[in-house]
Image (spheres, rainbow, N blue to C red):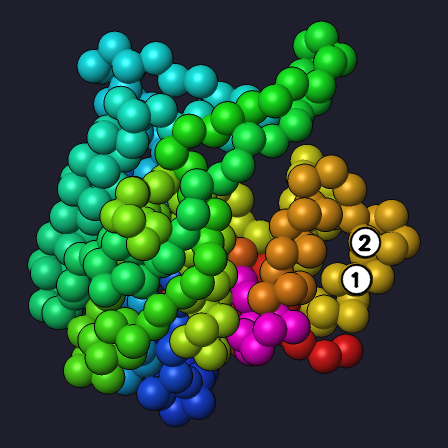
């Protein structure tokens, strides 16, 4: 047992040397943060990565916690084709949940591991400049009729300003950013956390974008563990789409990751946010843990 642990340390060394001074952007889903033990374990892994000289920036959402709070307070939620309509009451709850409870819980878990983290939302330092999403024509699958849907206080990103994040990262702080943004008039919007993480990764010229997901990677068949893709290139990912081997929800996920890599991020990873040591295994071992997509062929 001791020998195997020592071998893992040896295996990690070249990766530590390779990534020292580079930037990792890590996106948490709400589900990742709801279990205290799981969050404490992830904070420990992030603290280790940060401690060896890698710059880490965390972005988080919190849709599940928002839905739970809305239910407790009797605020009715409307979800259309998997997308939440953010009315004024829901936006107030999103501010409380994202920039309040979840952000503070992550900071507290990192503080327990002596990591200097700073809590932010996309509104701080004008990080996320957004505008209200215009009404959109959507097909009602129940009726088969198209409807005009107003998603309320949901925003689309216009620009990402990473000046504040660079200052913090260069000063050895770990920024933790909740998925809110604002327009020039100060109107606040609920924004998809995956989108914010992707745009921040591009603007920071990140070495890695790591998505902590409910699943441990991308699968050709979600019901068959053996079809998990361990490592593929952008060219191979495109071939999966054009050949029809990629199906369903896998297609937009691959397309979004391909776009990120084409815009300069060195690699993108999809791993489980609830498997202990998954993050360390993905970053510091040859075998990895989830799915890694890299540029080139």
> Which portion, as a residue range, is magenta?
261-269
Q: Determine which quarter of the picture holds residue 97.
A: top left
Residue 176 at x, y = what percent? 25, 59
In the displayed structure, 102 sits above or below 201; it is above
Q: Is residue 22 magenta?
A: no
- Give neighbour class at mark 1: few <14, some 14-19, many 20+ (Cα, 10 Å): some
Residue 66 at x, y = what percent? 30, 29
Q: Determine which quarter of the picture holds residue 17.
A: bottom left
Residue 28 at x, y = what percent? 37, 51
Is residue 231 visible in the rendered image? The answer is no
Farthest right residue in view: 243
Q: Tag 1, which secondary structure?
A: helix
Residue at 72 percent across and 79 percent down: it is 296
Q: Nearer the viewer, residue 123 or 69?
A: 123
In the displayed structure, 165 sits above or below 255; it is below
Is residue 85 visible in the rendered image? The answer is yes
Farthest front residue in view: 185
How many numbered callouts?
Answer: 2
Tag 1 residue: 238
Tag 2 residue: 241
Q: Nearer the viewer, residue 61 or 184?
A: 184
């Amino acid at each position: 047992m001791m020998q195997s642990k020592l071998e893992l340390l040896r295996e990690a060394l070249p990766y530590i040397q390779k990534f020292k001074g580079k930037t990792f952007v890590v996106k948490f889903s709400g589900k990742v943060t709801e279990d205290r033990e799981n969050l404490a374990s992830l904070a420990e892994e992030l603290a280790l990565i940060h401690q060896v000289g890698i710059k880490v920036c965390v972005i988080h959402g919190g849709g599940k916690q928002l839905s739970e709070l809305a239910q407790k307070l009797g605020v009715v939620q409307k979800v259309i084709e998997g997308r939440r309509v953010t009315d004024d009451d829901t936006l107030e709850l999103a501010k409380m949940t994202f920039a309040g409870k979840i952000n503070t819980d992550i900071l507290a878990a990192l503080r327990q591991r002596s990591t200097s983290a700073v809590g932010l939302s996309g509104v701080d330092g004008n990080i996320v400049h957004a505008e209200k999403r215009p009404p959109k024509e959507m097909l009602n699958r129940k009726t088969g009729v198209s409807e005009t849907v107003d998603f309320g206080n949901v925003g689309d990103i216009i620009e990402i300003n990473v000046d504040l994040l660079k200052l913090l990262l260069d000063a050895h702080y770990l920024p933790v950013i909740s998925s809110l943004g604002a327009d020039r008039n100060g109107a606040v919007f609920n924004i998809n956390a995956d989108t914010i993480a992707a745009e921040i990764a591009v603007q920071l010229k990140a070495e890695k974008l790591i998505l902590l997901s409910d699943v441990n990677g991308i699968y050709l068949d979600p019901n068959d563990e053996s079809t998990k893709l361990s490592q593929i290139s952008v060219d191979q990912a495109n071939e999966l789409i054009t050949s029809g081997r990629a199906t369903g929800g896998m297609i937009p996920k691959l397309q979004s990751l391909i776009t990120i890599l084409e815009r300069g991020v060195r690699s993108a990873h999809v791993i489980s946010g609830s498997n202990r040591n998954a993050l360390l295994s993905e970053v510091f071992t040859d075998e990895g843990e989830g799915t890694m997509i890299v540029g080139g062929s």
